[in-house]
Image: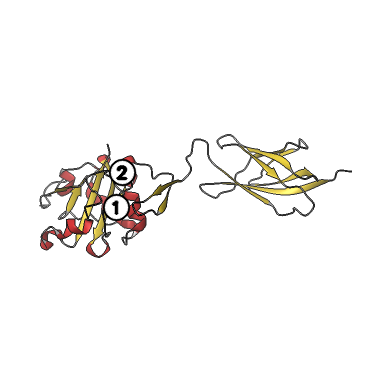
């Protein structure tokens, strides 16, 4: 006689790791189905065979069909991670020196990809707060407020899309002075601010020839080529949306 076994299945959101309630888990062989509880788990009845196909689905998530072994020795609970519908998997890019880097789902801004922003963020000696993406600036009207989200701008040594900009000194008389008089935060795709000790050795980029910074251009040489008093030991690179 074919025996019916119970197998625990746990279903979780791939991005957040949180359990998903209300996922239908159906065994094609027996026709049995059940929905996950708020803990993301369900005890599913499975026939004791060589294996069976199990379908996992919930509105808002990409459905899955997996092969499940159902022998007596198979007692380990199953863990399934589900991807939200319309959500992209992490991308992988190959850097100039052959290394591979994983990109988070939101790391898809083309100008930042083309100019190596994500690559330098992952490989340079600069800390995470040296890199600010435009979405963090959405609620502010002043680009100088970047200091609240990470490192403050180096206005004495500032490059916009690879070209150096001279910023007038702030007098404290007007709201929009300095870099705020030049650039609106809504135009910004990303900012990277380096102190002299954590500059990358090369101005890396993902795609050959992309952007104003090329493989022959070094961020260190950009900072060194400017009078040290003006450079103030730092440099900010601002990349605009296109």
The quadrant the N terminus occupies is top right
| Nearer to me, 7 or 19 | 7
Rendered location of residue 30, percent (x, y)? 78, 37
The quadrant the C terminus occupies is top left
Rendered location of residue 107, percent (x, y)? 39, 45
- The answer to whether 138 appears left or right of 10 in the picture is left
Q: CA distance from mark 2 to mark 1?
A: 10 Å
Rendered location of residue 146, percent (x, y)? 27, 51
Q: Residue furthest right?
A: 1
Rendered location of residue 76, percent (x, y)? 71, 54
Q: Residue furthest bottom?
A: 197
- The answer to whether 169 appears left or right of 92 in the picture is left
Is disc 2 placed on a helix, strand or loop? helix
Q: How many marks?
A: 2
- The answer to whether 135 appears left or right of 180 in the picture is right
What is the quadrant of residue 21 in the picture? top right
Can you identify the residue that label 2 sits on? 114
Q: Residues within 10 Å of mark 2 (few under 14, many from 20)?
A: many
**How is the rendered protein coloured?**
secondary structure
Q: Residues within 10 Å of mark 1 (few under 14, many from 20)?
A: many
Can you identify the residue that label 1 sits on? 204
| Nearest to N terminus: mark 2 or mark 1 | 2
- Residue 235, disc: none
């Amino acid at each position: 006689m074919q025996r019916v076994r119970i197998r625990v299945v746990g279903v979780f959101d791939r991005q957040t790791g949180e359990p998903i309630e209300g996922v239908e888990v159906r065994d094609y062989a027996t026709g049995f189905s059940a929905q996950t509880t708020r803990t993301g788990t369900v005890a599913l009845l499975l026939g004791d065979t060589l294996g069976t196909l199990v379908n996992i689905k919930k509105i808002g998530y990409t459905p899955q069909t997996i092969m499940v072994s159902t022998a007596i020795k198979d007692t380990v609970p199953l863990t399934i991670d589900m991807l939200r519908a319309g959500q992209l998997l992490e991308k992988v890019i190959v850097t100039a020196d052959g290394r591979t880097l994983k990109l988070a789902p939101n790391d898809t801004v083309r100008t930042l990809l083309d100019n190596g922003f994500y690559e330098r963020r992952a490989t340079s000696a600069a800390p995470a707060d040296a890199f600010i993406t435009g979405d963090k600036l959405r609620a502010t009207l002043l680009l100088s407020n970047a200091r609240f989200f990470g490192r403050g701008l180096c206005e004495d040594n500032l490059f916009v899309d690879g070209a150096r900009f001279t910023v007038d000194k702030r007098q404290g008389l007007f709201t929009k002075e300095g870099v705020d008089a030049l650039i609106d935060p809504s135009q910004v795709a990303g900012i990277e601010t380096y102190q002299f000790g954590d500059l990358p050795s090369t101005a890396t980029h993902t795609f050959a020839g992309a952007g104003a910074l090329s493989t022959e251009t070094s961020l260190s040489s950009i900072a060194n080529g400017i009078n040290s008093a003006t450079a103030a030991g730092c440099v900010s690179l601002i990349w605009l949306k296109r």
